């Protein structure tokens, strides 16, 4: 790729991120002098290097800011711009329920197994990247949480996936991948994702050891992905948080929204500063996939594609630790084959750190 092309990439990608960030900053600017809006920052990182591979879904990263779950007595605790939407979106529009808003920026990277070929690997998945911003609207009661997430993103060279992977390989002293000239073309994406989670079975969440079962179901519609999904999570540990589970980067999950309800409802000033709890978790998420741009190829242009599997499942196990206002979660995810030509399932690791402030 020539210097002019990279310069155009940088300009347009910078514009995209600037627009995404301005949505956040502009919304807060009107109220910054009055009160704090967002109270939780969560950083996600997923990579197949945890399993010693470099293929398929090879890297994912996301940063999320979220507000506390509160009942809107005066429509004042959420960003002003959000009320127009959250009061209209089904399942989260009840002002008598506790509601929250989250905003995110993320990037996903996908590569074939043979990353050393410069020519197109016909029988393996396309090279692809996805850069996106997301806004989530959430509502919860004592035993149920509903979430909508709306994503605006871009697939293709403007996702900066090639540059991100090249930078990380150079940083680690690894050999660069060779086939990014064959990646999917640029395509703007719009996604709507809904997910509902509820407490089907739980023991006392007061201090001490306890367990719970948290099923979920939902769907996603858009030119990046269209699917129906359902699954469940089982947790066991010391001082279980009163939230709705621990998930990796899964659109619509937004596990760490509203941290005031995940630290035993204790205000920050009253929380312990040391170790406060831990838990193990086991989860499954199954999907009926109707469309996946990273396998089906570009929507509006001819591109490389492979034969997508309709039924895909993730099996996850992990552990989480709470230290005062910080939660650290690490998990392994086993993902079944996503396309017909694939010879192997995939395993990757997921790490996220949440800070309530």
Image (cartoon, rainbow, N blue to C red):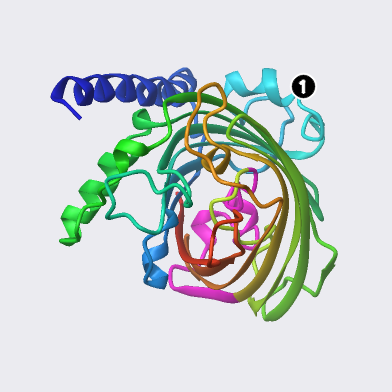
Q: Is residue 32 visible?
A: no
Q: Quadrant of residue 46?
A: bottom left
The residue range painted magenta reads 252-279
Horizontal placement of 169 versus 275: left or right? left
Horizontal placement of 278 versus 6: left or right? right
- Residue 157 is situated, as x and y percent measured from the top left of the image, at 34, 31
Horizontal placement of 236 versus 259: left or right? right
- Residue 139 is situated, as x and y percent measured from the top left of the image, at 74, 40
Q: Quadrant of residue 14?
A: top left
Q: Main secondary structure of the magenta part?
A: loop
Instruction: Spot the residue most to the right.
Output: 200
Label 1 residue SS: loop
Count numbered badges in the picture: 1
- Residue 229 is situated, as x and y percent measured from the top left of the image, at 74, 50
Q: Residues within 10 Å of mark 1 (few under 14, many from 20)?
A: few
Residue 270 magenta: yes
* Residue for point 29% across, 52% down: 117
Q: Which residue position holds label 1?
A: 88
* Residue for point 62% across, 58% down: 262
Residue 329 magenta: no
> In the rendered view, would you say 32 is above or below 265?
above
* Residue for point 52% across, 70% down: 332
Q: Is residue 264 visible?
A: yes
- Residue 18 is situated, as x and y percent measured from the top left of the image, at 35, 22
Work out whether residue 158 or residue 353 is closer to the camera in this orientation and state it: 158
Look at the image and tell me in which quarter the N terminus lies: top left
> In the rendered view, would you say 63 is above or below 314?
above
* Residue for point 49% across, 21% down: 27
Work out whether residue 2 or residue 268 is closer to the camera in this orientation and state it: 2
């Amino acid at each position: 790729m020539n210097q002019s092309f990279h310069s155009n990439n940088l300009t347009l990608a910078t514009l995209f991120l600037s627009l995404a960030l301005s949505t956040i900053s502009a919304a807060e600017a009107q109220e910054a002098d009055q009160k704090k809006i967002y109270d939780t920052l969560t950083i996600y990182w997923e990579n197949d290097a945890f399993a010693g591979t470099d293929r398929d879904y090879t890297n994912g990263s996301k940063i999320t800011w979220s507000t506390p779950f509160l009942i809107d007595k005066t429509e004042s605790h959420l960003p002003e711009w959000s009320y127009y939407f959250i009061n209209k979106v089904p399942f989260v529009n009840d002002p008598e329920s506790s509601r929250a808003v989250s905003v995110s920026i993320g990037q996903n990277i996908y590569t074939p197994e043979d990353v050393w070929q410069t020519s197109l690997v016909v029988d393996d998945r396309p090279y692809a990247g996805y850069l996106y911003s997301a806004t989530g609207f959430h509502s919860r009661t004592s035993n149920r949480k509903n979430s909508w997430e709306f994503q605006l993103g871009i697939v293709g060279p403007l996702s900066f996936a090639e540059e991100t992977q090249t930078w990380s390989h150079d940083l680690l002293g690894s050999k660069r991948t060779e086939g990014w000239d064959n990646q999917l073309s640029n395509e703007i994406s719009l996604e709507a994702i809904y997910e509902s989670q509820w407490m089907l079975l739980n023991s006392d969440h007061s201090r001490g050891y306890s367990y719970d079962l948290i099923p979920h179901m939902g769907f996603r519609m858009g030119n990046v992905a269209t699917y129906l999904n359902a699954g469940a999570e089982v947790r066991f540990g010391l001082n279980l948080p009163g939230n709705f589970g621990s998930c990796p980067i899964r659109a619509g999950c937004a596990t760490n929204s509203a941290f005031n309800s995940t630290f035993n409802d204790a205000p920050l000033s009253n929380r312990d500063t040391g170790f406060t709890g831990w838990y193990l978790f086991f989860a499954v998420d199954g999907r009926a996939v109707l469309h996946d741009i990273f396998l089906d190829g570009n929507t509006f242009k001819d591109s490389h594609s492979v034969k997508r599997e309709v039924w895909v499942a993730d099996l996850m196990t992990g552990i989480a630790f709470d230290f005062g206002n910080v939660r650290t979660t690490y998990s392994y995810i086993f993902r079944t084959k996503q396309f017909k030509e694939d010879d192997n399932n995939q395993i990757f690791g997921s790490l996220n750190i949440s800070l309530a402030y």
